[in-house]
Image: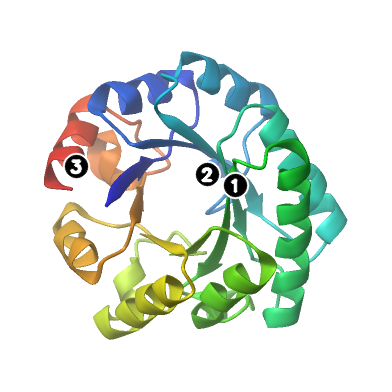
Amino acid sequence: MLLLISPINTQEAREAITGGADIVDVKNPKEGSLGANFPWVIKNIREITPKDMQVSATLGDVPYKPGTVSLAAAGAIVSGADYVKVGLYGTKNYSEAVEVMENVVRTVNEFNSDAIVVASGYADAHRVGAVDPMEIPQVAADSGADLAMVDTAVKDGKTLFDFMDEDALSQFTDKTHDYGLKSALAGSVTQEQLAILAGLGCDVVGIRGAACVGGDRNSGTIHHEAVAKLKQMV
């Protein structure tokens, strides 16, 4: 299981790198769960990240606007992202989600066919009107994406497990693997929950809050010691 840590700037990225993160995931919590950061931040973080360490970039909690999202994907790739992560926030059903993801996949392949495309749904999709998270593995497979992910849309202290129990998460992971894709789980994941996620067989675990001083994704900052502890646990 790979450890994905989500910094918001180069200072936090250095902490994630020093702590031994497997994937440095550039995001901006001010713009939401999978809020997008600026192209120059992605570029600067890619420049300070070792070549053998991958950089991910979130495109945001995206609307149902395939063209807009595709343009964002191009920007992330040009800025140096190895992973492009799409939060399917404004897509209300399978068809809309596939349409967005198909165009993102086509865009990414135009610029860097080696880059990894992530289709991300939300465990609490019912709270924001997004596509059912259990449809995300099929959305990823049918659109040509590489990885299916589930996160939480609303960051109010509740975790992934408040909306999907172990059985549901196991089904999500198994379904993703049945399609020949990799799975990722995130959503205010705590240290105590890492062993459970590993046992479910997920390929990537996404963390920000638990890697921050004080455990707060918004007011805290990522610290290398917290990252190193998480890495050791993983």
Residue at the disc numbered 1: 35
| Circle 2: element type | helix
What colouring style does the render use?
rainbow
Label located before the other in sequence (2 or 3) = 2
Q: Nearer the viewer, residue 227 or 106?
A: 106
Q: Would you say the residues marked 2 and 3 are in contact, meaning their CB atoms lie under 8 Å apart?
A: no
Quadrant of the image occupied by residue 167: bottom left
Residue at the disc numbered 3: 230
Q: Which residue lies at the image location 78% right of the left edge and 42% below the top edge? A: 110
Q: Which mark is residue 216?
A: none
The relative height of residue 137 versus residue 221 in the rendered view (above or below) is below
| Residue 61 percent location from the top left of the image | 64, 56
Residue at the disc numbered 2: 29
Q: Which mark lies nearer to you, 3 or 1?
A: 3
In the picture, measured across the screen, residue 217 lies left or right of residue 229, that is right
Q: Which residue lies at the image location 42% right of the left edge and 79% below the top edge? A: 175
Label located before the other in sequence (1 or 2) = 2
The relative height of residue 64 versus residue 35 in the rendered view (above or below) is below
Give the residue type at disc 1.
Gly
Give the residue type at disc 2.
Pro
Q: Would you say the residues marked 1 and 2 are in contact, meaning their CB atoms lie under 8 Å apart?
A: yes
Q: Which mark lies nearer to you, 2 or 3?
A: 3
Determine if residue 164 is in view: no
* Crowdedness near tag 2: few (<14), some (14–19) or many (≥20) residues, C-alpha within 10 Å: some
| Residue 33 percent location from the top left of the image | 52, 54
* Crowdedness near tag 3: few (<14), some (14–19) or many (≥20) residues, C-alpha within 10 Å: many
* Crowdedness near tag 1: few (<14), some (14–19) or many (≥20) residues, C-alpha within 10 Å: many
The relative height of residue 42 versus residue 200 in the rendered view (above or below) is above
In the picture, measured across the screen, residue 55 lies left or right of residue 73, that is left
Give the residue type at disc 3.
Leu
